[in-house]
Amino acid sequence: MAKSTTLRTPLGRSVKIIEQGTGTPVVFLHSGVGSAGEWKQVFSLWPDGDRLIAIDAYRDGTGPGTAGRRDLDDYTDQVYAVADQVAGPVHLIGFSWGGATALRAAAVTPGLIASLTLVEPEAYALLRTENPGAYSQVRGLRDRCRAHIRAGRWHEAYAEFVDFYNGPGSFASWPSARREAFVQEQQSRADLWDVLFDDLLTAESLADVTAPVHLIEGSHTSAVDHAICAVLRRHLPDAEHTVIEGAGHMMPLTHPEPLTRALSHRISR
């Protein structure tokens, strides 16, 4: 059964984790608009023999550090807290926004990472020089969302955001109560975009990633996510690459069975 624990980080902050099982430590990082709960289905399907640890990066919604001035290292600090807790290297799995954090951790502290799995990491900064067209597309999305937020149009901002990753009309198809709860939660995460465009992640920094890498993408994901995965495959030529057929970006929720098979098979090896 999964249990919740709060750890102290090296920077003197706290981070909530959800864990289950015993054995090899496998650490999971969620998306920017989600929580550790994104991994619930994957945890339920995972074979015995591993200690699964999901970091809940935003805890009570506040996030680490100072709002408006956070960077990726505020979140890698949470990964280091887990590595301290298990007293050894971890297999690190990062999805979406968590994938950008995982990349930063693997580049800065390679000795802590036994293996690195990236599930469509939103490392937008890599596109600035590697694919300016895709970079312009996602920057345009960011700027439109920011304009909506500045004008108090939170629903319009997140309708465009959700539809970008899940297809036109996705946000409108949610029940009203779900839309309201989602928008309410996201209002404390308005600095998310700044973290993902952070210059701490560059194509040159990928040379510092020495752990074995497994890159996973969905066959039906966005053009921007395909572009980021293409950049990573160019700069991490030895990375294993898996495509989850029929999956879009939110595959931990929509395609947990094939995703779990891909993740657990790699860790078991």
Image (cartoon, rainbow, N blue to C red):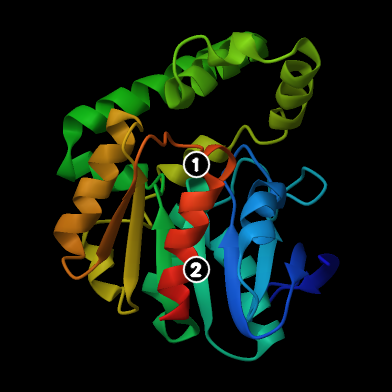
Mark 2 highlights which residue? 264
Residue at 31% of width from left, 55% of height from top?
A: 242
Mark 1 highlights which residue? 251
Other residues around mark 2 within 10 Å, as few (<14) / some (14–19) / many (≥20)? some
Instruction: Residue 199: give x, y in percent of width and height.
Output: 35, 51
Q: Nearer the viewer, residue 191 or 40?
A: 40
The N terminus: image quadrant: bottom right
Vertical comparison of 162 with 83: above or below: above
> Which element carries disc 2, helix, strand or loop?
helix
**Residue type indicated by callout 2:** Ser
Left or right, 86 with reference to 215? right
Left or right, 99 with reference to 135? right
Residue at 17% of width from left, 43% of height from top?
A: 129
Mark 2 or 1, nearer chain start: 1
Residue at 37% of width from left, 71% of height from top?
A: 107
Instruction: Residue 14: give x, y in percent of width and height.
Output: 78, 66
- The answer to which image quadrant residue 235 occupies is bottom left
**Residue type indicated by callout 1:** Met
Q: Nearer the viewer, residue 235 or 136?
A: 235
> Which element carries disc 1, helix, strand or loop?
helix
Res 14 visible: no
Left or right, 188 with reference to 111? right
Res 267 visible: yes
Q: Nearer the viewer, residue 185 or 259?
A: 259
Instruction: Residue 189: give x, y in percent of width and height.
Output: 66, 36
The circle drawn on residue 242 is none
Cβ–Cβ below 8 Å for labels 2 and 1? no
Residue at 49% of width from left, 68% of height from top?
A: 264
Other residues around mark 1 within 10 Å, as few (<14) / some (14–19) / many (≥20)? many
